Image (tube, rainbow, N blue to C red):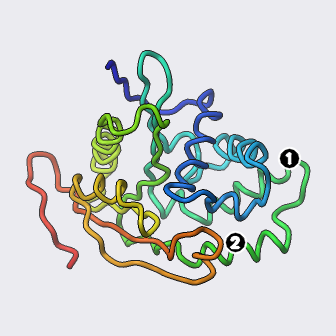
Amino acid sequence: MNIQIRSAKPEDAQFLAWVILASGRAHVQRGIWEVILAGTEKECLTFLEQLSMTKTPHLFHHTCFIVAEVDGHLVAALGGYDPKVLGYPALRQAVVEVSQEMGFSGLDEGAIRRSEKVLCCIPDEVEGAWVIDSVATVPEFRRRGIVSKLLDKILDKGREQGFRRAQINMYIGNIPAQRAYEKHGFEVVDEKRHPDFEAEIGSPGMVRFLRDLPPPNRPLYSSYF
């Protein structure tokens, strides 16, 4: 299998929209974006495609992603970002931008209430950590080591930018993802649970993982406990 990994491009926006939606679903059937937007799958994908191409860079912008191709076909992707620059304040600005482009003023009161029910379990960003997000592979290419290669690459990218720790979050109960992250040196730090989140998503909450990012040629070590 010929796997090529590269930075995402604007023309990958449609695939990235699927990645963002699929990673939000993970092992459940209704992800965070579907709860917040309360639209059809097509409507959610349209919104996310536009979100990946905004003028404002943010954690779901195409410039944060790397993608994997097999024989020229996109099969997987994930994102990595500096939360101080591209975190949730930047995302909120981008959501306003997309909303205006799509012809509505912004998320209505219903969307805000739905957001509160799911965002309550989003783990806090660890100071100085490179954050990995939106990990997804098309079904027929799962369990072939593609995500492992993407993780190696995105961790290298964070290390090159001077980060010495990396963070990744997932839904409680997503065992395959947990095994993949632990294989790459991540360890569970803590979790957030809330009954509203479980009622909307189907998972009790979210887990936060951390690992060190030692400079090249230095062994992995733990210093955050």
Residue underneath mark 2: 115
Question: Is 213 on the left-hand or right-hand side of 47?
Answer: left
Question: Compared with residue 14, is residue 208 higher up or lower down, i.e. above or below?
Answer: below
Residue underneath mark 1: 102
Question: Is 123 on the left-hand or right-hand side of 168?
Answer: right
Query: Residue drawn 41% across and 61% down?
Result: 174
Kind of element beneath mark 2:
helix
Query: Residue drawn 58% across and 50% down?
Result: 60
Which amino acid is tagged 1?
A: Met
Quadrant the C terminus occupies: bottom left
**Mark 1 crowdedness (10 Å alpha carbons): few <14, some 14-19, many ≥20:** few
Query: Residue drawn 61% across and 41% down?
Result: 18
Question: Is 129 on the left-hand or right-hand side of 44?
Answer: left
**Distance from Cα at disc 1 to Cα at disc 2:** 20 Å
Mark number displayed over residue 26: none
Query: Residue 38 location in percent, x, y?
Result: 78, 60
Query: Residue drawn 53% across and 40% down?
Result: 63
Query: Residue 4 location in percent, x, y?
Result: 37, 23
Which amino acid is tagged 2?
A: Ser
Question: Compared with residue 50, is residue 106 higher up or lower down, i.e. above or below?
Answer: below
**Mark 2 crowdedness (10 Å alpha carbons): few <14, some 14-19, many ≥20:** some
